[in-house]
Image: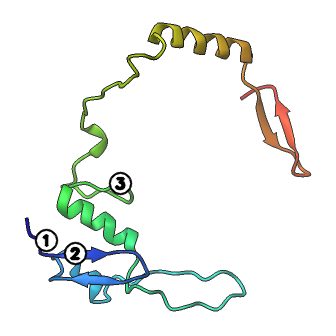
Amino acid sequence: MRVNCARGALPDPLTANGEPLPFEQPYWSGDRPADVIPWPDEEEEPYALPFHPLELGEDALRALCGFILEGLPEPGDVDAYGIRLHGFRVRDPKGPDPAEKEAELRGVAEAMGPPRFYSMGPNGSLVERDIP
């Protein structure tokens, strides 16, 4: 197997080998600049990349997999949360019986009592509330 293109999307070190894919071109050409906001009273240092790597990552997900995890989906995007996956439970065959473990967890939950709810008081301390 031969890798035709490789990218390092971390600010340091910057690597870009091979021809960019079509969805990458606006990033590497500077058309999608990183919107970096400096901390107050600090000078803005130049950002190491001409774009924000997370934005490139989302466009890579859309172009290569057909969905995104953040941002607004486009009409052609796949609903990633609508895809059913098989799940498997792995347990130690020499470990405790699952029914015993479940009974232990129920006992711990019952011993905890009802949940308590708090809100922030006017002086910044936690104040217990009666109603969630």
Pointer 2 and pointer 3: residues touching (CB < 8 Å)?
A: no
25 on left or right of 108? left
Between the C-alphas of marks 2 and 3, the distance is 22 Å
Q: Amino acid at mark 3?
A: Leu
Q: Residue at x 34, y 82 (%)?
A: 32
Among the two numbered marks 1 and 3 on one chain, the one whose residue lies closer to the N terminus: 1
* Quarter of the image where the C terminus is located: top right
- Quadrant position of residue 64: bottom left
108 on left or right of 124? left
Q: Amino acid at mark 2?
A: Ala
The vertical placement of 88 against 118, above or below, is above
- Quadrant position of residue 121: top right
Q: Residue at x 59, y 90 (%)?
A: 44
- Give coordinates of residue 115: x percent, y percent: 72, 23
* Quarter of the image where the N terminus is located: bottom left
- Quadrant position of residue 52: bottom left
Pointer 1 and pointer 3: residues touching (CB < 8 Å)?
A: no
Between the C-alphas of marks 1 and 3, the distance is 26 Å
Q: Amino acid at mark 1?
A: Val
93 on left or right of 19? right
The numbered disc on residue 3 is 1
> Which-is-in-front pick, marks 1 and 3?
1
Residue at the far front in the pictured view: 94
Mark 1 packing: few (<14 Cα in 10 Å), some, or many (20+)? few
From the viewer's side, name the closer residue of 25 and 129.
25
The numbered disc on residue 6 is 2
Report helix, strand or loop for mark 1. loop
Residue behind mark 3 = 69
The vertical placement of 29 against 124, above or below, is below
